Image: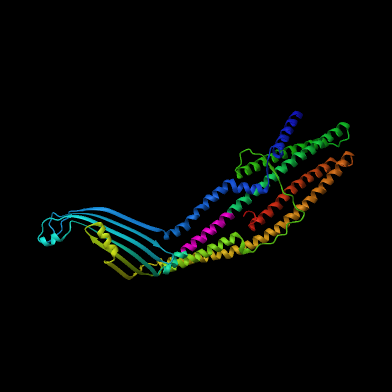
Amino acid sequence: MKHKFLILLNLNCFLFFCLTEPAVGMPLSQDQVIALVLKQGLKTKEIQFQFAQNQLAEVLALSSFDWKLNLESGFEYDRSRAWSPFVAANSKYERIRTTLGLQKQLTSGTLLGFEINRLSFKSEVGPSASTTSTSAIPTQASQESYGLLLEQSLWGNAFGESDRAIVSAARKNTLASDMTQIDELEKIVLETLRQFWESSVAAKTYTQAVAARGRYQRLLDSARRKTKLGFANPGELSLAQAEVELRDQAVSNAKTEALLKQENLVTALNLKPGTMLEFLLPPLSSQPTQSSAPAISQTRLLQAQKLKAEASEDLLAAARSRNAPSLSFVAKSYLSGADETDSNSFNAAMSGVNPKYYVGMKFSHSFGSDLRQEEIRNKQAMADLEKSKLSRLTLENADLLNQALRKVQSTSEIAQSAARLNDFRKAIVQELTVSYGQGRVDLRALIEAMNNELSAEVILTRTIGDAQMAQLELAALKDELIH
């Protein structure tokens, strides 16, 4: 039994060495946790991939103003029968048609376009009823035209009102998405820092459990000596042995919990499996940090929601403008030329002697369903929803900040009280240990005092962790955890 106990003691001492030895463990502080999470955390990568998809909306909105190039060219062979007194049934035509167009939509609701049309043909015309008309038709010719197009919306997306509103909404939603991404990353950082503190508390608890078992072992040795000398009260040795067994169980449980917390933290930080850690903890200040809540509207959460509300108003304005009847001013100008040779055809077009102009108005409107009105009602409901969320989040965020400030104050006071309690418990154990050695105190009283001391140590460790986490939660609410 004695050899078994020594083997178990040596094993736990080795595990304690692995958990706390600086030469083996990787030093890890709060700042290092934040840096590692943002650099290589697995959840961080998921958030980045998720929000990267939100960048598409703005690009899609701006794609309405892309340059649009159209090119069509083809060959046509025509021997179709034409019921004409001038063309015989065995006439043959070969045509090459080429059309090139370039258009650009502006944010002012203006459509600009440029167009080139070219037709080259060869013909073989058979005998016809009118030899005069037949001889007048050239066997080879080219015809081309160059045109400019201007179309300006006057009603329904008047002067680009709807287009600009859609782009503005997309940009605001993208900015809101970026702010929300930072908030989500901050939540992951805070969650990992909580794991950091839980793991450090578990490691400290394990250290305390090992130390406590050593104290109880020394108490057992003292009880054995008193029993051999015949000074022990009935049951004292068995009571000490039972307490040592309880401490063995506590060490085993604490070791399992410490390794569990540490493994979870290593995984969260995306470190090499099996990495041992040494926790570098900041000291608990004797006075809680006096911190005031920032301006409510300056937090990222509310700034993002405000942008969403503004974007929904833009989409509502866009729907109202877009669903009005469409009225546009249209102007077109063409220069054309035709000749038997390509060069002469081009020179004739560029000379401007054969212009063609068009000026007019274009109107369109669809009716017969409630789609337009329903779309406007839908956008109105969306705008009202986002404004309602903004009002609610403003109040909730103010409450959370005030509650976080009170929690920082409370947990700091509790941690300081726990430190004083721990000092008192240690003093009691020291006094009773001396009295027990003198035979003036029963072993039960000393064991009870030692148990209370151990509980005080555990409480102190946990309250320090709670106080530090309260300060981190306040920093996260104030957008000070990450920038």
Residue occupying image coordinates x 80% and y 37%: 240
Whole-percent x, y for residue 88 in the image: 12, 57
Whole-percent x, y for residue 383 in the image: 51, 65
**Closer to us: 6 or 89:** 89
Whole-percent x, y for residue 384 in the image: 52, 66
Asked if one can make out residue 300 in the rendered structure from this viewpoint, the answer is: yes
Whole-percent x, y for residue 308 in the image: 53, 62
Quadrant of residue 23 in the image?
top right
Residue 180 is a magenta residue? yes
Asked if one can make out residue 143 in the rendered structure from this viewpoint, the answer is: no
**Closer to us: 363 or 18:** 363
Quadrant of residue 89 in the image?
bottom left
Residue occupying image coordinates x 79% and y 45%: 453
9 in relation to 128, above or below? above
Q: Is residue 338 left or right of residue 402?
A: left
What secondary structure predominates along the stretch shown in magenta?
A: helix
Quarter placement of the N terminus:
top right
Residue 153 is a magenta residue? no
**Closer to us: 376 or 223:** 376
Q: Which residues are magenta?
A: 166-183
Q: Is residue 41 left or right of residue 76?
A: right
